Image (tube, rainbow, N blue to C red):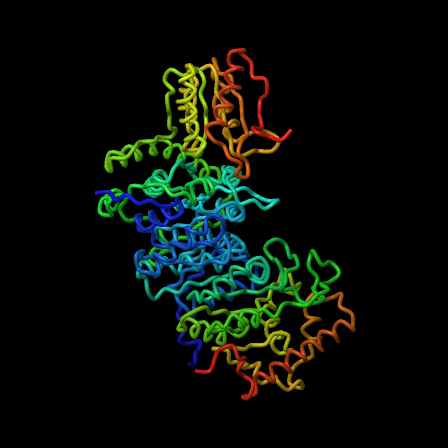
Amino acid sequence: MAQTVVDTANHIVAIATKAARVQVIAAYPITPQTSIVERIAELVESGELDAEYIRVESEHSAMAACIGAAAGGVRTFTATAAHGLVLMHEALHWAAGSRLPIVMPVVNRSLGPGWNIWADTTDSMSQRDTGWIQFYCADNQEVFDTIIQAYKLCENEQVLLPAMICLEAFILSHTYMPVKIPDQEKIDDFLPPYKPGWVLDINNPLSHGNIVSPDWYMEFRYMMEEAMENAKRLIPEIDQEYSEYFGFERRGLIEKYKCEDADLLLLTMGTIGSEAKVAVDNLRKEGLKVGSARVRVFRPFPKEEIRNLAENVQMFSVIDRGISFGMEGFLAEEIKASLCNQKDRPLIAGFVAGLGGRDVTFKTVEKIAEKSSKWMRAGRVEKETVWVDLRE
Amino acid sequence: MMVSIKELSKEEYLLKGHIACAGCGPAIALRLLFKALGNKVILVIPACCSSVIPGPFPYTSFAVPVQNMLFEATGATASGVVAALRRRGVKDVTVVGWAGDGGTFDIGIQALSGAAERETDFIYICYDNEAYGNTGIQRSGATPYGAWTTTTPTGKKERKKDLAFIIAAHRIPYVATACPSYPMDFIKKLRKAKEIEGTKFIHILAPCTTAWRYDTSKTVEIGRLAVQTGMWALFEIEYGKFQLNPPSSRLIDKAKRKPVKTYLTSQGRFRKLSEDDVKKIQKWVDEDWERYHKLSSNSVSDLGLYGKI
């Protein structure tokens, strides 16, 4: 019988490391990730979690230690946020290029200056080209499920890439929600021990990461791209296997809500997706045919599903809690790129909202939908990117 | 624990075909590392000459497992490898961080400091050629006063960090200096380090023919001159106790040391030094030796880094 606990996403992350039988943890504290590393310390020191815990002196070293441990052949974990993540940037590339299945929750927080500890996805979005798989979660149950699924995915020999499990600061990290935790026996069945393809072993002395000339480098990078494509195929399969095995909800690459007959689609990520569902219900009562599509997996990007969604709708309204300066919101950018060769494209409007933790509630989403629907009826997007609730 | 040439293994784990410069001091030191520890070694190597020396994929001239790593991350990466081995129950394998002076004195000092403070069970070896050699001889925190590099074309204006003492202040059980010109001393220290639990730090002065501007046949000689003039001292700090090793232990009396000028004039990198510069360097070296002298007397050899039991 699955057990239901009521806890914050950060504590759920700690429970997930135990459930996944993580063997080496290397981490450095940063707000709002701290309650993850504190709870893991309690679990390790009480003996509940049988793992090595390296309390490193920086996030760069956290990722370096994870790389060393994963190359040493064990299941490896770290967690970070914001400035910690961007300090890791160099090592993120090295982890992915080393093809090591490290799993790392990222508590999405804004980047300074000025100092701001609240939700914003610019931290992880600016790591999108590092070769890491990226999941974005909407609730605490999804955080737990995705960590377990991510180890299964990343350790698959057709993938062998690391993954970030992104969850927004405070909205999830410090908010109590009920979460079903499956029995350990069943989790062990679903997620068997890590069997690395190659390890640092004196009986089989391999050099990891040595010099690669232009004659070979591209092939290694192409293999990473193939691994990403394999991940795109395997994520829904693993999701289905997990949901059938534990009797949990399926989520897929994109969580769709009332999309079938919609004229207007709200495309979101993370917790804004939950608000969008409430907004959809409210707006449908007023007769607006609107649906919500929450993109769960940002890398690999589900281009094909986006194209399918675009087929029968008149308009996409894309909401981003992050900004690529000089362009637009990250999701808006990717969606437009995915559709560039489609003949009949919907209108696409981008909305930047909730930076630095400003609230984005269902009411905000309703406002966005109402503005969008006006443009949809007029057949013209008046403004390519709208900054929502911005002071005049 | 005496070591003699005769008892060393004939096995080579730095294989033929490596692409180090002729007369490379670090390559000699690498070979000695394997002579001392055999092949039950996992190397963690950051960006440095030794990430190039084994040659490009699909070849390598290292016959031991190697984790190549980011420039600044040797200490942290080794921490991860050590943790993984412990998890897997692997015993009798020594994890060795093998990094240059740039990767140790400068960009990597944080990760090394962290690993030492966490009492990580590994040997960290800094092979110090006193410049960023692999990138074309730029100044590092290890470059000595007055030395030419491509970023100090008129000679470096600052002194070298006293790294061994910085690391000793982390209260690790073993710190030592060495030089490949004294192979038995180096091998003895490596074997001692292997038997000690915790972080062990060995700082090797590794003469670099390319950066130091001397003939490729003179590497061993230059290393000897460094020791004979007192520019480089061979010592150990074991559980906080300082001890000079031969031949440095016989050089406390200034009269027994060759003038530093002999060392400085043997290399092109010091050719722009003035007479005043040479005097200044001689004075600093003499001051260092006064300190070694004090530390070598029984009453003060204890650096006070370890509490009395």
Residue A165 placement, left or right of B153:
left
Point out residue A319 in the picture as x, y percentages from the top left corner. Answer: 50, 28
Q: Taking A276 as reference, is A47 above or below it?
A: below
Quadrant the N terminus of chain B occupies: bottom left
Which of the image's four quarters has the C terminus of chain B?
bottom left
Residue at 28 percent across and 49 percent down: it is: A193
Which of these two is toward me, B230 or A158?
A158
Residue A383 sits in which quadrant?
A: top right
Classify residue B221 as left or right of residue B268.
left
Q: Nearer the viewer, residue B175 or A202?
A: B175
Q: Residue B182 or B244: which is nearer the viewer?
A: B244
Residue A205, horizontal then vertical, whole percent: 37, 55
How many tags in the picture? 0
Which of these two is toward me, B198 or A106? A106
Q: Where residue A360 sits: x, y (%)?
A: 49, 32
Is the residue A234 above or below the residue B222 in the image? Answer: above
**Percent x, y for residue A86?**
53, 45
**Residue A215 visible in rendering:** no
Seen as rendered, the residue at the extreme top is A378
Query: Left or right of A324: which side holds B124?
Result: left
A316, above or below B96, in the image: above
Say if residue B37 shows up in the picture. Answer: yes
Q: Residue at the spot x=41%, y=27% of the render?
A: A278
Q: Is residue A383 above or below residue B231?
A: above
Q: Is residue B85 left or right of residue B103?
A: left
For residue B154, which quarter of the picture?
A: bottom right
